[in-house]
Image (cartoon, coloured by chain):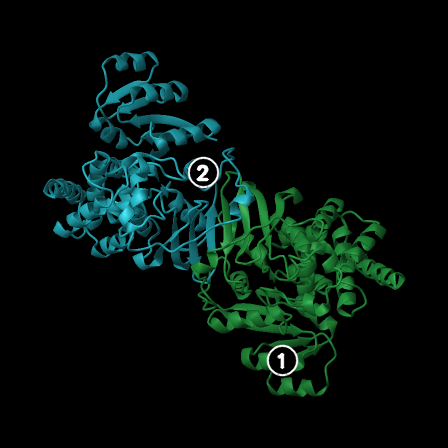
Chain colours: A cyan, B green
Amino acid sequence: MNKKRISIWGSTGSIGTQTLDVVRQHPERFKIVNLVAHKNAEIIFNQAKEFRPSCVILTGEVESGWHSRFHDMDVRLETGPEALITSASSGSEDMVVNGLVGAVGLTCTVNAIQAGVNIALANKEVLVMAGDLINSLLRNRHVKLIPVDSEHSAIFQCLQGESPESIRRLILTASGGPFRSRSLDELKHVTVKEALAHPNWDMGAKITIDSATMINKALEIIEARWLFGVSPEQIEVVIHPQSILHSMVEFVDGSLKAQLSVPDMRVPIAYALSWPDRLGLPFGSLDISKLYRLEMIPPDPDRFPALKLAYQVLETGGTAPAVFNGADEAAVKAFLDRKIEFTQITECIMEALNRHQKIDNPSLEQIINADQEARDTVQGFIRLMK
Amino acid sequence: MNKKRISIWGSTGSIGTQTLDVVRQHPERFKIVNLVAHKNAEIIFNQAKEFRPSCVILTGEVESGWHSRFHDMDVRLETGPEALITSASSGSEDMVVNGLVGAVGLTCTVNAIQAGVNIALANKEVLVMAGDLINSLLRNRHVKLIPVDSEHSAIFQCLQGESPESIRRLILTASGGPFRSRSLDELKHVTVKEALAHPNWDMGAKITIDSATMINKALEIIEARWLFGVSPEQIEVVIHPQSILHSMVEFVDGSLKAQLSVPDMRVPIAYALSWPDRLGLPFGSLDISKLYRLEMIPPDPDRFPALKLAYQVLETGGTAPAVFNGADEAAVKAFLDRKIEFTQITECIMEALNRHQKIDNPSLEQIINADQEARDTVQGFIRLMK
């Protein structure tokens, strides 16, 4: 069997390192082509030593000494954001695992699809910002995009062997994050440290904060709409604090399928890498006793207004989802920098959406402009709030 | 679209009437060819009036007046067990829904497969008695056998789009029946009326008693082994009192899929009729609040020895499963006739298994003989117990 050629974008992050964990289990199946990270040269050097990619790309600043160290190892080092854009267009791999965080992953994903490369997508912002555009590119280039998010992987797994017309609704589960049982008033005083401590999943800072505000689930609603071609009314969210049941599909005959596993991202990552096959993995069989108590609780729309926003944004359409996403990125950064309070994250997003004049059927450039405009609006709004 | 031609064996029973409920929802999809029942002429006459089959078969005794009544309706009435055997061999339908109960369904199922007819199987005893033989017939004739049992339908649904090598284990759920919380001592004094009152499912008498003894689950373990080609060690049972989660598959990557629905047999029946499509059905979408509390409890091997017996019977192989099934049918009948106590059902089966000299790779005739021998052993054992 030919090895599948894989590039990892964001190889030093949570998704990237866990992807390498999976590849380490199955060296007979995968060959790493490119490793891409922002600036952590030390970590990516060690990854390169183990996995021997053709090329390492660091999009941030790098001390000059690294070039010769990589050169000595016979691995090409390229630097700067343009290096990723160029590499993405080269089509030198069978699949890209996009573990980037935020809008930064959009252009290079478009390039990779245009180059005919399949995408394992953890970088949900790509679909949130440009779902319609991405879907038409995928169709034109006959390229597959496989979700890595645990919820979307669950739905994707449940839909194997099913036709799209059979779907009645998708039920996304949400852990509810660390503040599931806090009152609206208590939420105001949440600290950065508290918000970064997710009870079930070990993830990066941005997605952990998004989990705490439930904006992550709002992004997932938008992502699901584009991934599975359903209407927004067909998507529901239910709180499931144990993070064992990762999502469900209800079919037109009243039958539901659910996918369950221990909360370990390596399971959906491996599925995206091996689909439609499955890889034997040693990362933990689910102890049936974990199923002794599975809770499902309807979300409280007052405490977590983000969910309602997702449906509004989808109804508005056009550039609105890109504004939603860009505003969230700016607001989360401001929260992490201690410039705004936890509950103000959602307020910033609402402000950006209110100010925006949406554009229908936007081009990639218009989407990127809307994203930037949203970030600017949030900056201005934060200055005003002081 | 051509209508799918369906015959229903056991049309006046629980599976049969529910199959007609499904067909009634989708007259554009299905044409009823033959309706088969034992002797309830009144009910099957009304069914024939509504669904206009070509032929009605009553395998039991019928008053002569019925012939002219069916004749006036332009429906052929045939009678006696041979009429079913002949009809099964005719290949006049695309699919048979076998809703018969017990060993009586074996020969006609073999005939239908040989005639190239697909089988929707509720009559699990067919696979329990002759799994290996049935599987090789299915392969030779390129015929599909789709499970109707809710647990096996759940597994079958979860396996769509998956390869057999991906299966790590199958987890069959069991409601635990009406006596789930009774002590071994209390079980001795169970009455027929108590045993016939199943908490979740509305089923025939035989299967309801089998649920109470957990022998139904033992039969399902054996059925699953042949349906899905797994080894007995890959099959586990877990008690799930709510009967909402109908069974699960764990894959080699640690991912599990489960199928859930309201406990309504029309859901798996419809799936068997429409597979690989799904039919829109109005029989009840699962209220998410039903998921608020899903319990999973390991079964107590002391109180319900039937499960262990299933694994022993599979290990013995050959004619042993047919003996297990035949002895159970005789013992359940004796219990319903108030000749033995509830806990003696399993004792009768053990006696029959102990007395039996198993035959490997048995022919259909040897299987049928083993079944009869088991019934005789149970009769003799019951006489001795008095």
Disc 2: CA contacts within 10 A as few (<14), some (14-19) or many (>=20): many
From the viewer's perspective, is the residue at label 2 or at label 1 nearer? 2
Identify the secondary structure beneath mark 2: helix
- Count of marks, rendered view: 2
Q: CA distance from mark 2 to mark 1?
A: 53 Å
Q: Is residue B327 visible?
A: yes
**Can you tell which quarter of the image residue B103 is in?**
bottom right
Q: Amino acid at mark 2?
A: Val
Q: Amino acid at mark 1?
A: Ile
Residue A252 x/y as whole percent: 43, 62
At 40% from the left and 31% from the top, the residue drawn is A18
What is the quadrant of the N terminus of chain B in the image?
bottom left
Outermost residue on the right side: it is B384
Residue A328 as seen in the image, left or right of residue B33: left
Q: Nearer the viewer, residue A295 or B334?
A: A295
At 21% from the left and 33% from the top, the residue drawn is A337
Residue B33 x/y as whole percent: 58, 72
Identify the secondary structure beneath mark 1: helix
Q: Which residue is the site of mark 1?
A: B43
Residue A379 as seen in the image, left or right of residue A165: left
**Can you tell which quarter of the image residue A326 is in?**
top left
Rendered view: B52 above or below A138:
below
Q: Which residue is the site of mark 2?
A: A267
The chain ID associated with circle 2 is A
